[in-house]
């Protein structure tokens, strides 16, 4: 009798796992998709319109006032020891 109960609980566990897996697959299927061509066009548009200060060969030299990576402050150092 106990072996039959063990088989039943094992089969119930497998059934539950299959139901959970099926639910995850349904959620995956319902997720909105973007075509690769649209995503790549969006990425290219972003790269062309967003100025990147780390690529001066494309955007030209960056003025110190516009450069977010330039050291801030008039003392010439970015660290202070207290």
Image: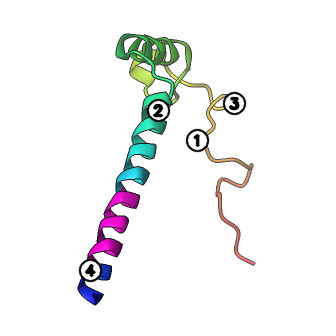
Q: Is residue 6 left or right of residue 47?
A: left
Of badges 3 and 4, nearer the viewer stands 4
* Farthest-out residue, front: 1
Colouring of the image: rainbow
**Mark 3 or 4 closer to N-term?**
4
User: x, y (%) of residue 72?
Assistant: 69, 47
Residue at 43% across, 26% down = 55
Q: Is residue 11 magenta?
A: yes
Disc 3 from disc 1: Cα separation: 10 Å
User: x, y (%) of residue 43?
Assistant: 45, 19
Query: Which SS class for mark 4?
Result: helix
Residue at 29% across, 89% down = 2
Residue at 31% across, 62% down = 14
Name the residue carrying label 1.
69
Name the residue carrying label 4.
4
Q: Are marks 3 and 2 in contact (CB under 8 Å)?
A: no
Q: Is residue 77 left or right of residue 59?
A: right
Name the residue carrying label 3.
65
What secondary structure do most residues of the magenta stretch adopt?
helix
Q: What is the span of residues highlighted in magenta in the rendered image?
A: 7-17
Quarter containing the N terminus: bottom left
Q: Are marks 3 and 4 in contact (CB under 8 Å)?
A: no
Disc 3 from disc 2: Cα separation: 15 Å
Of badges 3 and 1, nearer the viewer stands 1
In this view, 74 is above or below 39: below
Q: Are marks 2 and 4 in contact (CB under 8 Å)?
A: no
Q: Nearer the viewer, residue 77 or 34?
A: 34
In this view, 62 is above or below 45: below
User: x, y (%) of residue 29?
Assistant: 43, 30
Badge number at residue 54: 2
């Amino acid at each position: 009798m106990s072996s039959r109960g063990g088989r039943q609980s094992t089969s119930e566990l497998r059934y539950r796992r299959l139901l959970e897996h099926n639910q995850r697959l349904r959620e995956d299927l319902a997720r909105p998709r973007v075509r690769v061509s649209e995503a790549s066009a969006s990425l290219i548009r972003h790269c062309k319109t967003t100025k990147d200060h780390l690529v001066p060969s494309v955007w030209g030299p960056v003025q110190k006032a516009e450069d977010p990576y330039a050291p801030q402050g008039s003392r010439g150092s970015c660290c202070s020891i207290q």
